Image (cartoon, helix red, strand yellow):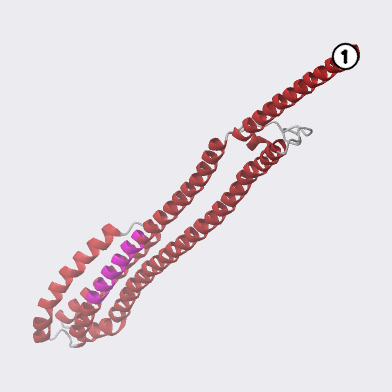
Amino acid sequence: MHYLSSLRIGTRLAFSFAALLLLMLFMAVAGVLQLRQAAQLNAQRAVLAQHDTAIEEWQGAVTLNLTRALGIGASGYHAPTVAFLEPPMKDTSLLITQLQDTIDKDLTDPAERALFEAVGLKRKAYVDVRARAAAAYKAGRPEEGKQLVDGPMTAHAKAYLEAIDTLQQRVRAGAQALEQDAARHVEHAQVVIAALAVLALTVGAGLAWAITHSVTRPLHQAISAAERIADKDLSVPATAGTARRGDEIGALQRALGKMQDSLTEMVQQIRAGTNGVAGASTEIADAS
């Protein structure tokens, strides 16, 4: 409080406003940083969501072609069946290749890359056994071909799809984790802003009380001193009970003190003059 009394009132008010503005700046910066991080997480989640969509389309195309290939195998590579299903299979294979290339370029997470490479290995195993089954039927070994279709070819097709599904689940889990992180950052930003707002209110209320108290209390003392002087009571110094201040109220108190000193000196001079006149009158009366 003594430090405040050494500052001018304008300086005190400027200090208070600066403190509140600084807290508001902290609130804004903290909120922007938290929301920016949440926005970055949302952007990453959106990318993973696109990956998920591409993988789902890829899985659908692969499932369609696997169903066609297993149908051809179940038919014993019946020529009309092959002629009917091979053209759309080629078109779907082109789509699968395009989707694979897109996914291959987009995936950057090491774990996702490892799962994608595992899909490639499962696909290669399936393609190899499918070629062996087709060669067996074309070579006139239908029993061998049927065993390959019913056994390894079907098993590898299932493993191929399961590998794609595992990759998709990994990507979805990553997207959900990023979504949760973004929600937590938004919630944390709300908590930080609320805490800073409470702090700003507390500091503002404290500064308001301190500044008001530093002004009103000495001002009341100055008013009381002026009222005593107006009532012709010069016995109590105008600056009695007040600390020496460096602000406008201190200047007012000192001015009142000087005025009181001047009035006291004037009264003393008047009393001295009156006493002198009275003494002279008495001497004149005694002489006569």
Q: Residue at x 58, y 34 (%)?
A: 8
The part of the chain drawn in magenta is 43-62
Task: Identify the amino acid type marked 1.
Answer: Glu
Queried whether the magenta region covers residue 84, the answer comes back as no
Quarter-wise, where is residue 55 in the image?
bottom left
Depicted 111 relative to depicted 136: above or below = above
User: Relative to residue 100, is residue 202 drawn left or right?
Assistant: right
Depicted 72 relative to depicted 191: above or below = below
Name the outermost residue toward the right. 286
Residue nearer the viewer, 208 or 287: 287
Disc 1 element:
helix
User: Relative to residue 60, is residue 215 drawn left or right?
Assistant: right
Quarter-wise, where is residue 102 in the image?
bottom left
Residue nearer the viewer, 134 or 213: 213
Q: Measured from the top left, where is residue 121 in percent x and y?
A: 31, 66
Figure quadrant of the N terminus: top right
Q: Which residue is mark 1?
A: 283
Queried whether the magenta region covers residue 49, the answer comes back as yes
Q: Measured from the top left, where is residue 184 in percent x and y?
A: 47, 63
Residue nearer the viewer, 88 or 146: 88
Residue nearer the viewer, 93 or 135: 93
For label 1, the crowd category at 10 Å Cα-Cα, with few meaning under 14, some 14 to 19 and many 20 or more, is few
Quarter-wise, where is residue 67 in the image?
bottom left
User: Relative to residue 205, is residue 112 drawn left or right?
Assistant: left
Q: Residue at x 48, y 51 (%)?
A: 27
Looking at the magenta stretch, what is its main secondary structure?
helix
Q: Measured from the top left, where is residue 195 in percent x and y?
A: 55, 57
| Count of labels in the image | 1
Depicted 105 relative to depicted 2: above or below = below
Q: Measured from the top left, where is residue 145 in percent x and y?
A: 22, 82
Depicted 32 relative to depicted 221: above or below = below
